[in-house]
Amino acid sequence: MLTFNLDWKSTKENGAAELRPDICPLGKYGYDSRCRGWYHQGEEKAMAGTNASHLHITTPYLFPDKIVGQSVTSPLIDPQTQGHVGQTLVDFLPNSVFTSLGRDNIKLSDGSFAIVITPQPDSKGHDTVYGPGFSLSGEGEAIQDVLQADDTFDSILNQMKFGQRGKGEFIRARSNGGEDEVFLSFAPVYVKNYYPVDSSDITRGVQSEEILVYSLALAETADGLISSFNNIDAFSSRTVDICIGVLSAIIIISAILIVWIAFRVTSSMTKPILQLLGVMKSINR
C-alpha cells in the first residue's frame, strides 16, 4: 500500500535516502511509504524466509505530523507469484505503556526502573519504548545509550531480543559520576496474530502465530536493595525499643503490684494476731 504527500521531504533525519536512495534521494519532495522504516523493515521481515513473522511492530518514531508513536505493519503477498505487493499499516500511541509502568501503578523503590524494548531496532539502531529518563517527545534511542550500560549488558540484551526469560546484572554509569550495580529480571511479551493460509481462497481459513512484540524488564540497583534492608533494620530497631519499653513498664507495674499484694496479705494476717494478743493481755490482767 503506497501513500503520497507532496509536503513530505527526504532528509537525513527521517533516513529515507539511506533506505531507498533510488526513489527517495535527499531533498526529494513527495511522501512515499516505501521510503519509511516501517515499510522497509516490514518487507524485509516478511521476505526473510518461510518461518518469518507476518507482523512487525516498529520502535517509537516521529510521524510526519510531528507526533511520536509506533506502527504495526503486515505484508501484502501476491497469492500467485508470492511476491511482495505492499504493506498494511496501523498507527498507535504507546502512551498507555508509559502510564502502566509509572510509579503510580507499580510499586518500585527509588533506585529501580522499568525497561521496554522492541525485538528489532530501526534503521538507526533505536529500540527503546520505555526506559529511565527516556521520553517519547523526540527521536528514539538505543537502550544501551539510555542506560549508559557497560558491555556486560550486551548478552542480556541479546536474550531479550530473542524472546527469552531470565535475569542478569550489569554496571550502569551515573549521570553525576560513579557507577551503579544493577540487577535485572526480564520476560517476553507475545501477541497472537492470524494470517490466511491462502489469500486467494478465503475458505482455506487462517493460521495463527505467536509474535514477540516487546521485551519487558524490571531493574533494581544494589544501593536500592540495600536501602530496603536499611528500612527494615530501622523498623526492627524501633520495634525492639518499643518492646523493651513495654516490657520494662510491665516489670515495674508487676513489682508494684506484688509489693501491694504482699502488704495487703501481711496486713490481713497481722491485724488478727494483734487483736488476739490484746485479748490475751486483758485476760491475764
Image (cartoon, grey):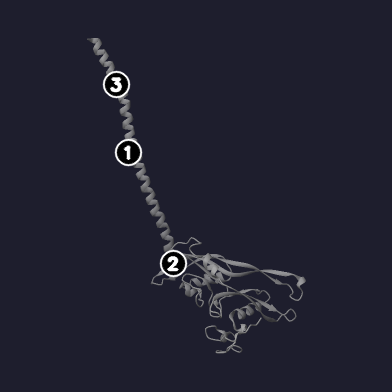
- Say whether residue 181 is left or right of residue 76: left
Q: Which amino acid does label 1 sit on?
A: Ile
| C-alpha separation, residue under disc 1 versus residue under disc 2 | 50 Å
Question: Where 105 falls versus 86 (above or below)?
Answer: above
Extreme left residue here?
285
Tell which tag, 1 or 2, sits nearer the viewer: 1
Q: Which of 151 and 143 lies nearest the eye of the viewer?
A: 143
Residue drawn where x is 39% and y is 49% of the image: 239
Q: What residue type is labelled 3?
A: Lys
Residue 229: image location, x then y, percent: 42, 57
Badge 1 is on which residue?
Answer: 252
Badge 2 is on which residue?
Answer: 181
Q: What element carries label 2?
A: strand
Q: What element carries label 1?
A: helix
Badge 3 is on which residue?
Answer: 271
Dot placed on the residue nearer the N-terminal end, 3 or 2 = 2
**Can see residue 149?**
no
Residue 238: image location, x then y, percent: 37, 50
Count residues near mark 2 (Cα–Cα under 10 Å), then give few for <14, some for 14-19, many for 20+: some
Q: Which image quadrant: the C terminus?
A: top left
| C-alpha separation, residue under disc 3 versus residue under disc 1 | 29 Å
Callout 1–callout 2 Cβ contact below 8 Å: no
Residue drawn where x is 32% and y is 38% of the image: 252
- Asked where in the image residue 90 lies, by quadrant, the reply is bottom right
- Say whether residue 181 is left or right of residue 57: left
Q: What element carries label 3?
A: helix
Tell which tag, 3 or 2, sits nearer the viewer: 3
Residue drawn where x is 41% and y is 60% of the image: 227
